[in-house]
Image (cartoon, rainbow, N blue to C red):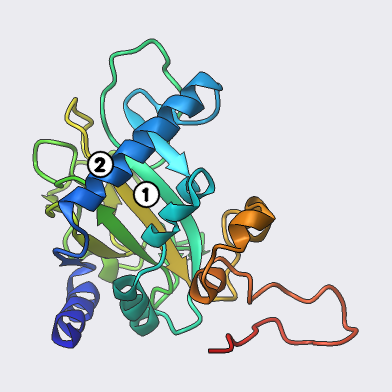
Amino acid sequence: MKKNIRNLISNVKKNGYGVLPGVLSKKYCGRVINKLEKILKILKKRKKYFGSNKNQVIYNYFYHDIKLINLVCNKYIDKVMTELIDEDYVLISPAARNPRLLDDKTAGKKTSGFGWHVDSRVIDKNNNSLLKPSINFFAIIALEDFTNYNAATKYIPNSHKFYKKPINRNQKIKFKNMTAETGSIIFLDTALWHSVGEPTKISRWSIFNMYGPWYMKPYYRFTDLLEKNKVKKLTKNAKKILHFYSIPPLNSEGVLTTLKKIKK
């Protein structure tokens, strides 16, 4: 495992991404997909955000089923993110995604991911330069095969070394597809130029988790998102990843430090 992790991290740094196969079983991935389909159905029925009929998106998927928190933190993600970021890494943004064409009248709303883009932060708008080196990375869990026939994520080889944001999202440029088997985890440098593939009627559920250093603000207030009964079910590591141990103090009375070390 150590050798596989070392090779993976080397690939992420060299190529902008790396694939770790066989992490989750097809049976487990199938159970997760069934849960996501039920959540999607509920969101549509309640007229809540679900993405669109050509790209279904469920943000904060574990909010709907706390058992899905296992997709946020597992030993493989933990080892890789500890090396790429540090041991105090946290979750920045979680989403379940499926670029699938649905035959229904519910159009939904615009979704992110289409067109060439990066998910790293721009630090100089004058020349679109990004943070260097990258401090954000994705762990993309392939719940179904990523293939050339079901909108596999497109990417521009070696573009993570540009440390530049694409100016034209729709420019024509040579690209490759990220292919991976069900149960694999794709680790992606957020500076790599990438885009959702052209949606098809073939399902391709996946989990996109973006991680960063503890001092980075998350997209959502995870500490307020979950009810107390769900928080009680979280492990210490899950709480750390969801920012429970990196909340700034209310004032200067008492503890002054933001980061709290987990007691093993």
Kindly tell me whether residue 45 is visible in this rendering: yes
* Residue at (65, 84) in percent of width and height: 260
Secondary structure beneath dot 1 equals loop
* Residue at (28, 35) in percent of width and height: 99
Q: Which mark is residue 171?
A: 2
Indicate the position of residue 238 as horizontal and vertical percent values: 50, 69
Mark 2 surroundings within 10 Å by alpha-carbon count, few (fewer than 14), some (14 through 19), many (20 or more): few
On the image, which quarter does residue 84 sit in?
bottom left
- Looking at the image, the residue that sits furthest to the left is 148
Name above or below for residue 84 compared with residue 191.
below
Q: Specify the amino acid type for callout 2.
A: Gln
Which of 54/192 is in front? Answer: 54
Name above or below for residue 192 compared with residue 60.
below
Indicate the position of residue 187 as horizontal and vertical percent values: 27, 66
Q: CA distance from mark 2 to mark 1?
A: 9 Å
Q: Specify the amino acid type for callout 1.
A: Ile
On the image, which quarter does residue 217 sit in?
bottom right
Indicate the position of residue 89 as horizontal and vertical percent values: 48, 76
Left or right placement of residue 133 versus residue 242 in this view: left
Left or right placement of residue 139 versus residue 252 in this view: left
On the image, which quarter does residue 23 sit in?
bottom left
Q: Are marks 2 and 1 in contact (CB under 8 Å)?
A: yes
Name above or below for residue 60 compared with residue 53.
below
Q: Which mark is residue 140?
A: none
Left or right placement of residue 85 versus residue 1 in this view: right
Q: Which residue is label 1 attached to? A: 167
* Residue at (48, 56) in percent of width and height: 93
Which of 33/209 is in front? Answer: 33
